[in-house]
Image (cartoon, coloured by chain):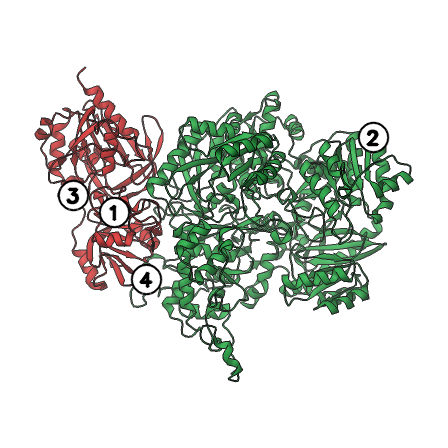
């Protein structure tokens, strides 16, 4: 069936800001959908509030709206654009929920917009747990027993009937938000209450627990001719009870017989038909009883999902793209498979490799949060790795996490781990946490048997048996030194996925003595000069000398049955290389690795732009990354994609391969050097003069920068800003000298190795001080110390975070404004891309602060100083490419806080606001173009105001301190734009799910220092008609000013207190400013409650002032919408 | 770590593929082919159609779920040799009764693990299926290559006599308990149809699914003449799958010629090819065949695409088919004939495996169609 002809334009809904449970996989999905639908000739209208996405690039759609994802706003877009159809299935849960609201409220019908991809009936059936279960039961499929309830009392009754433990699953929430497990009545009261509040429809499912059962997912597709395919099966290593987003997962399923797999497939077919998904993809989850094989249907997502992004990357089958084509009427057999080109999409990929995904968490950022994994997703990112075997893939994934792991149970800096095994406690294995997989390694080293480990963890024994092999190989390696290691053993270790670093760490040197018992002897015998332990580079050299080199296989969807035309590659240790390296001019772009707080989609955006820019310059583009959620790891984005961990070893291997430096002569001797291995005749090695391929390291955030030194040392040419300049900017001493030479101010600072030293520095520069370890990302472990006591506590904690690293101490500029500048330099010229003022005062991490372009409270005089200093710093550093500078403005003085000669988090925001693609320009400059050639010589003008607001995950982390600080904790961002600051700010807040009230009650509770400034804000709120409530101290101050404010108890003063007031629903706005470093128990209870009740919470006075501007603007004029294309068109005229 | 004994696979083109011994120690010759199913190695091992073949599995981990008593497709394992990338050190499944390595050894199957199977498969893809020798007994390359060249070629080879039953037998069982529809009508003595099944190497799941459709089955040796079959007064005749070159199964082709028009006929795989030959068509050898569980086949009746299980090295030549023979199914990957039908003669066949085992169950409706055909053929 050909495509529909009754539709000409399609509205695509994105998923909004990155939050836990909904990350950049939906940018990947949305980009695929937009690209293919435009190619099909449809007019695409796109709405997404997240400016950091590739999908919101103006060239991805005909009309791009970076606007809040609310029904009111989308209705305005519909009125303006009059689309024929709406595609809700590529925008995650957000897109689906919004589409449902639009459908239910009659907006779609009113404007004649048809839902495509999934019908409202199918969405309702899949999303409403009760309806879903009933439908499954009616279709003869098994589901866990349970019932949907709307009150805690009813929850208790149901649990009593089906027996504890029970799962609590709120309806219509993301990533299982608000869910939990209850083992008894007391727990259930709490969990059910939280779940009911989390659900937008106050509904939770109380369900028979299948905790400990095996968990499987099938990614399936169905077209309107009822053709059905399973794209991928996924097995969760962590059994039921851990959210699949927090599970280590494996594709394809490893421990099912064909009979069992086909039973799940048949069930999936019934599910998708019953729910009625007729033109798209779905994710269906199953629980399987390991003792009896009994399968139950758990849930189904009638849309593109995180798992489907993973499945797409795992198989080479682009689910979102195909789903979009099905939605416009094609059938699977009409769509070609891009990779084989000769076969259709109506097939099921066969994998001759194993894919492992490991989540990445950020618990270190949220002290006080329960790190136990459960039904509510807590991870902030993930790594995917591909290997021929499970072990190879697992070890690649673990080293790709960038948490210091160099393999299974091995960490950088550890010598001879495992020789004196650390016996884990049973609970280390029983309780699912981020560390459990590493405890399993310890247990295996300690000789625990597979059954015991499997029983405690719920991991299928098959996986544990595989892991046992890793530990066995490790033990064999530990018997050898670098010189004695047998080639076969070294090869075997590489086949099991060992990194060179891991091998180096377990090999013994003469000084290690016998199995680690030698240390006792040294007292008796004078120690002979111990030989240096081997480094990863030593192992590398030895390995290469032995001809043990990786080869690259292609992801081909078909287990080699057909030829693959797409160079989507992964490394493995086998005999035949399939990379077919070309001798075209080329460049390698290093991606950003797993998403974590501080490094997310913004950097992937920059990498993708760099790739597009270089391709347009005629280079063959080569991407290396291991994050399956991203656009950069779409095989369509770059000419060649290496899905590999971003470690020095893996990156150098690729570089040597692409540069023709891989020593092909050795390659022929693979296994059994005496035999004439067939592979010889398979892959004629192209001979061309080898030349080192240049690499771009400035786009992927901190990840590639961390590798830069090693890459340069290995001879890799780095395009763009030099390694020396990067080092200069990161080295405090050198950087201070530079600023002094340039006569640019920076806050007084010092460095200290211990508490005494730190006290001395603090006394010299005066409290409060900003303290942080050197070389960290996202303000990790950054804090403000107000006195000696706070400083001591900090130094104590810092020692644990980065032992041996000095601590940096800066004067903390209280009440300063911060300003961010993004710029591009070409070595001769530096052009500013955008200047952003932070809405929150200094002390809030720039990633967590709202920002506005243009600066709305900085004088032209100060702006000219900022511009001048930025240019002088950029030229002094010789920046070739992107640079970000943070300035602070205090008491009329401009200070430089930090310079990063690389892409920054704000680059996409600036690009969206100005219409100037900074990352693209930077890549062109890095490749040797001049800014003048590119026509970018002047800071771009702005029309109106653009506000970027951070989105914080406090709702996912009950117990976390709800306050902005120097430690970055936001996961994502939204943008609001309008002709006035107030409207732009209101939109940004709305996008961040903070619906600023235009009237009603406002609760004020501020610290003593802020009392002076709260008066004006309170007065304005009162004028705008708000009823004021305040805690005693604040109220007294307001009364002095003659403002009426009702006194409310603090929580510690007893009921009725502030939290009761919030519960009553009388208050829509809370302004609560914490003080200093004290534990603010009262404020914390209030702020947590605000998050829980969805009340707008402002924790800084500058934020409060901005909120007042927004309220004023909203009362004057309703919000309006405008597409980026329209905006930039007008700006140019 | 397991003690490793070197083993070798040598191909007639002179390439050799090293690995380690698995299963029985010995040496076997056969045609080397690959199967892309990610699950179902037990079904593959016990499928008589693989007689005379050394099967390479593309899935890297084989043996994960061990073997169990329910998933055998016949009374024994038939492959000449078995080639895997990584054999599982243990079986993990609630139904498993034995680890794979043990099963292979006790069934005398010579196998090899640790082989770079992807490179081998790419080699077969480009060079075609070919003769090979697998040895864990004396892995000497030159001798083995010579032995591979001396092995008989699949073309023109009738392998059916090795796998067919010696005597007729009856079949009434459905799927194992818990997997099917409970006791079949035949088990209760209430079968509606009597099917005579030619055993060219029949898979059990075909028998089970026929039984579940209300049939009782008499399985007869491949050489049974048509007259003997007709004497059993069948409601329909089934032509089974099996190994080797269909054109060499002359007795089968003759029997089907004699049966055509006299009783409803349904053929699967080799049975389908024999039907095609009996109708006057010809067959040809594919470059490397179709073996896997993910092949898209489209029905020309419904235009619906079935994801199907395949295991064939030969195919019916569409151009050779006389008038009146409809091609009902074709492969969307390579256009190969996957099904044919002659309405007047009440005969149809499919090249692929609606009984799956291993593979998706999309094509099970064909068994129902056979029963419907038998129903329509009954005197009113």
Q: Chain of mark 2?
A: A
Q: Chain of mark 3?
A: B
Q: Label 1: which residue?
A: B45
If you read the primary sequence from the N terminus, does the residue marked by circle 3 or circle 4 appear first?
4
Disc 1 is placed on an element classified as helix
Q: Label 4: which residue?
A: B2
The red-tinted chain is B
Q: Chain of mark 4?
A: B
Q: CA distance from mark 3 to mark 4?
A: 34 Å
Q: CA distance from mark 4 to mark 1?
A: 23 Å
Q: Tag 1: Cα neighbours inside 10 Å, few (<14), some, or many (≥20)? A: many
Nearer mark to the viewer, of 3 and 4: 4
* Label at residue B163: 3
Is A1054 in front, or is A640? A1054
Mark 3 on the same chain as mark 4: yes
Where's residue A682, x and y in %? Answer: 34, 57
Disc 4 is placed on an element classified as loop
In which image quadrant can residue A1022 be found?
Answer: top right
On the rendered image, what quadrant is the N terminus of chain A found in? top left
Would residue B126 be found to the left or right of residue A1009 on screen?
left
On the rendered image, what quadrant is the C terminus of chain A found in? top right
Would residue A926 be found to the left or right of residue A224 on screen?
right
Where's residue A1026, x and y in %? Answer: 81, 32
If you read the primary sequence from the N terminus, does the residue marked by circle 3 or circle 1 appear first?
1
Is A681 in front, or is A723? A723
- Image height of A814 relative to B216, above or below: below
Q: CA distance from mark 3 to mark 1?
A: 13 Å
């Amino acid at each position: 069936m050909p495509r529909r002809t009754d539709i000409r334009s399609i509205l695509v809904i994105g998923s909004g800001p990155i939050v836990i449970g909904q990350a950049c996989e939906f940018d990947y999905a949305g980009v695929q959908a937009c690209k293919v639908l435009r190619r099909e000739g449809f007019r695409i209208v796109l709405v997404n509030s997240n400016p950091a996405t590739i999908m919101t690039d103006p060239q991805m759609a005909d009309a791009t709206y970076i606007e809040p994802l609310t029904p009111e706003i989308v209705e305005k877009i519909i009125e303006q654009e009059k689309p024929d159809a709406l595609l809700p299935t590529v925008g995650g849960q957000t897109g689906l929920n919004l589409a449902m609201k639009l459908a239910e409220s009659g907006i779609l019908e009113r404007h004649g917009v048809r839902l495509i991809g999934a019908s409202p009936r199918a969405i309702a059936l899949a999303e409403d747990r009760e309806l879903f279960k009933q439908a499954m039961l009616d279709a003869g499929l098994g589901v866990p027993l349970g019932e949907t309830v709307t009150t805690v009392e009813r929850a208790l009754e149901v649990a009593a009937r089906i027996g504890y433990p029970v799962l609590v699953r709120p309806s219509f929430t993301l990533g299982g938000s608000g869910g939990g497990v209850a083992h008894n009545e007391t727990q259930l009261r709490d969990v059910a209450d939280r779940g009911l509040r989390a659900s937008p429809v106050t509904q939770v499912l109380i369900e028979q627990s299948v905790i400990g059962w095996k968990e499987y997912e099938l990614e399936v597709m169905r077209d309107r001719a009822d053709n059905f395919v399973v794209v991928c099966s996924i097995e969760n290593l962590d059994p039921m009870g851990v959210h699949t987003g927090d599970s280590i997962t494996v594709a394809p399923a490893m421990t099912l017989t064909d009979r069992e797999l086909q039973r799940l497939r048949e069930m999936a077919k019934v599910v998708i038909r019953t729910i009625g998904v007729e033109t798209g993809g779905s994710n269906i989850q199953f629980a399987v009883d390991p003792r009896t094989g009994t399968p139950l249907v758990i849930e189904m997502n009638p849309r593109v999902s995180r798992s489907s992004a993973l499945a797409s990357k795992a198989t080479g089958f682009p689910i979102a793209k195909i789903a979009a084509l099905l939605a416009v009427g094609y059938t699977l057999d009409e769509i070609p498979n891009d990779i084989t080109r000769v076969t259709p999409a109506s097939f099921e990929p066969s994998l001759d490799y194993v894919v492992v995904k490991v989540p990445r968490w950020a618990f270190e950022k949220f002290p006080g949060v329960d790190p136990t994994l459960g039904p509510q997703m807590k991870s902030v990112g993930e790594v995917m790795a591909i290997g021929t075997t499970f072990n190879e893939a697992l070890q690649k994934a673990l080293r790709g996490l960038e948490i210091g792991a160099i393999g299974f149970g091995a960490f950088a800096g550890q010598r001879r781990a495992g020789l004196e095994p650390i016996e884990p406690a049973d609970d280390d294995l029983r309780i699912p946490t981020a560390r459990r997989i590493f405890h399993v390694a310890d247990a295996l080293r300690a000789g625990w048997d597979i059954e015991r480990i499997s029983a405690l963890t719920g991991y299928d024994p098959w996986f544990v048996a595989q892991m046992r092999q890793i530990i066995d190989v490790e033990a064999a390696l530990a018997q050898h030194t670098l010189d004695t290691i047998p080639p076969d053993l070294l090869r075997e270790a590489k086949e099991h996925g060992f990194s060179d670093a891991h091998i180096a760490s377990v090999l013994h040197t003469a000084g290690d003595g016998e199995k680690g018992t030698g240390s006792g002897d040294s007292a008796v015998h004078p120690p002979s000069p111990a030989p240096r332990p081997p480094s990863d580079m030593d192992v590398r050299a030895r390995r290469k000398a032995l001809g043990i080199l990786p080869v690259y296989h292609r992801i081909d969807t078909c287990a080699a049955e057909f030829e693959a035309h797409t160079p989507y590659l992964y490394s493995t240790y086998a005999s035949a290389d399939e990379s077919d390296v070309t001798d075209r001019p080329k460049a390698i772009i290093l991606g950003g690795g797993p998403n974590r707080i501080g490094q997310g989609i913004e950097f992937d955006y920059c990498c993708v732009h760099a790739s597009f820019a270089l391709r347009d310059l005629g280079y063959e583009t080569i991407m290396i990354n291991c994050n399956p959620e991203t656009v950069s790891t779409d095989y369509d984005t770059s000419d060649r994609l290496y899905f590999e961990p971003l470690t020095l070893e893996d990156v150098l291997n690729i570089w040597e391969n692409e540069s023709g430096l891989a020593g092909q002569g050795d390659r022929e001797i693979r296994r059994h050097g005496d035999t004439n291995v067939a592979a010889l005749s398979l892959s004629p090695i192209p001979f061309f003069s080898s030349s080192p391929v240049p690499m771009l390291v400035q786009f992927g955030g901190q990840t590639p920068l961390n590798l830069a030194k090693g890459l340069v040392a290995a001879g890799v040419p780095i395009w763009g800003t030099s390694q020396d300049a990067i080092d200069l900017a990161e080295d405090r001493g050198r950087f201070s000298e530079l600023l002094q030479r340039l006569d640019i101010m920076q806050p007084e600072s010092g460095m200290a190795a211990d508490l005494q030293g730190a006290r001395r520095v603090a006394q010299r520069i005066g409290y409060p001080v900003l303290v942080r370890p050197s070389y960290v990302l996202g303000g990790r472990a950054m804090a403000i110390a107000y006195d000696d006591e706070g400083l001591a506590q900090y130094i104590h904690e810092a020692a644990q975070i980065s032992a041996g690293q000095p601590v940096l101490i800066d004067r903390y500029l209280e009440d300063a404004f911060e300003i961010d500048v993004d710029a591009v330099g070409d070595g001769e010229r530096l052009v500013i891309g955008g200047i952003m003022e932070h809405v929150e005062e200094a002390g809030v991490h720039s990633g967590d602060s709202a920002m506005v372009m243009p600066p709305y409270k900085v004088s032209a005089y100060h702006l000219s100083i900022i511009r001048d200093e930025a240019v002088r710093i950029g030229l002094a550093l010789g920046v070739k490419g992107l640079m970000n500078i943070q300035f602070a403005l205090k008491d009329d003085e401009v200070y430089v806080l930090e310079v990063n000669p690389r892409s920054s988090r704000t680059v996409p925001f600036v690009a969206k606001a100005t219409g100037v693609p900074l990352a693209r320009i930077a890549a062109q400059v890095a490749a040797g173009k001049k800014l003048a050639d590119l026509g970018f010589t002047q800071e771009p003008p702005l029309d109106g105001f653009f506000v970027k607001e951070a989105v914080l995950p406090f709702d996912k982390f009950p117990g976390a301190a709800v306050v902005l600080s120097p430690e970055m904790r936001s996961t994502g961002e939204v943008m609001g734009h309008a002709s006035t600051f107030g409207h732009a700010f209101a939109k940004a807040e709305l996008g961040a799910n903070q619906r600023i009230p235009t009237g009603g009650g406002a609760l004020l509770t501020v610290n003593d220092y802020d009392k002076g400034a709260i008066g004006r804000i309170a007065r304005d709120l009162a004028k705008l008609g708000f009823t004021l409530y305040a805690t005693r101290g604040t109220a007294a101050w307001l009364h002095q000013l003659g403002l009426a404010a009702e006194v409310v108890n603090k929580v510690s003063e007893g009921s009725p207190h502030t939290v009761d007031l919030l519960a009553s629903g009388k208050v829509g706005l809370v302004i609560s400013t914490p003080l200093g470093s004290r534990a603010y128990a009262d404020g914390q209870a209030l702020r947590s409650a605000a998050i829980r009740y969805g009340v707008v919470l402002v924790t800084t006075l500058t934020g409060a002032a901005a909120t007042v501007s927004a309220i004023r603007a909203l009362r004057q004029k309703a919000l309006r919408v405008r597409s980026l294309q329209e905006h930039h068109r007008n700006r140019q005229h | 770590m397991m003690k490793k004994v070197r083993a070798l696979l040598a191909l007639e083109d002179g390439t050799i593929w090293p690995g380690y011994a698995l299963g029985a120690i010995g040496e076997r010759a056969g045609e080397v082919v690959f199967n892309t199913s990610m699950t179902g190695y037990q079904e593959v091992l016990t499928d008589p159609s693989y007689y005379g073949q050394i099967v390479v599995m593309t899935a890297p981990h084989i043996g994960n779920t061990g073997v169990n008593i329910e998933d055998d497709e016949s009374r024994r394992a038939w492959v000449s040799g078995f080639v895997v990338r990584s054999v599982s050190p243990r079986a993990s499944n609630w139904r498993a009764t034995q680890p794979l390595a043990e099963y292979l050894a006790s069934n005398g199957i010579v196998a090899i693990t640790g082989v770079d199977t992807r490179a081998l498969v790419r080699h077969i893809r480009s060079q075609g299926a070919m003769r090979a020798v697998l040895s864990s007994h004396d892995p000497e390359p030159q001798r083995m290559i010579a032995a591979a060249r001396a092995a008989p070629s699949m073309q023109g080879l009738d392998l059916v006599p090795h796998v067919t039953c010696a005597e007729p037998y009856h079949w009434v069982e459905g799927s194992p308990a818990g997997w099917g529809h409970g006791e079949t009508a035949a088990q209760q003595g209430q079968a509606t149809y009597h099917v005579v099944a030619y055993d060219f190497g029949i898979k059990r799941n075909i028998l089970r699914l026929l039984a579940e459709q209300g049939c009782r089955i008499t399985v007869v040796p491949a050489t049974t003449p048509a007259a003997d079959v007709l004497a059993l007064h069948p409601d329909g005749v089934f032509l089974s799958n099996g190994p080797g070159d269909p054109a060499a199964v002359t007795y089968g082709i003759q029997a089907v010629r004699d049966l055509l028009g006299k009783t409803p006929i349904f053929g699967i795989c080799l049975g389908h090819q024999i039907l095609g030959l009996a109708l006057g068509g010809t067959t040809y050898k594919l470059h490397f065949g179709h073996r896997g569980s993910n092949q898209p086949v489209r029905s020309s009746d419904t235009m619906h695409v079935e994801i199907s299980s395949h295991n064939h090295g030969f195919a019916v030549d569409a151009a050779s088919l006389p008038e009146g023979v409809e091609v009902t199914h074709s492969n969307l990957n390579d256009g190969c004939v996957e099904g044919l039908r002659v309405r007047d003669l009440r005969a149809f066949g499919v090249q692929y495996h609606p009984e799956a085992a291993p593979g998706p169950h999309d094509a099970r409706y064909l068994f129902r169609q056979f029963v419907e055909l038998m129903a329509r053929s009954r005197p009113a």
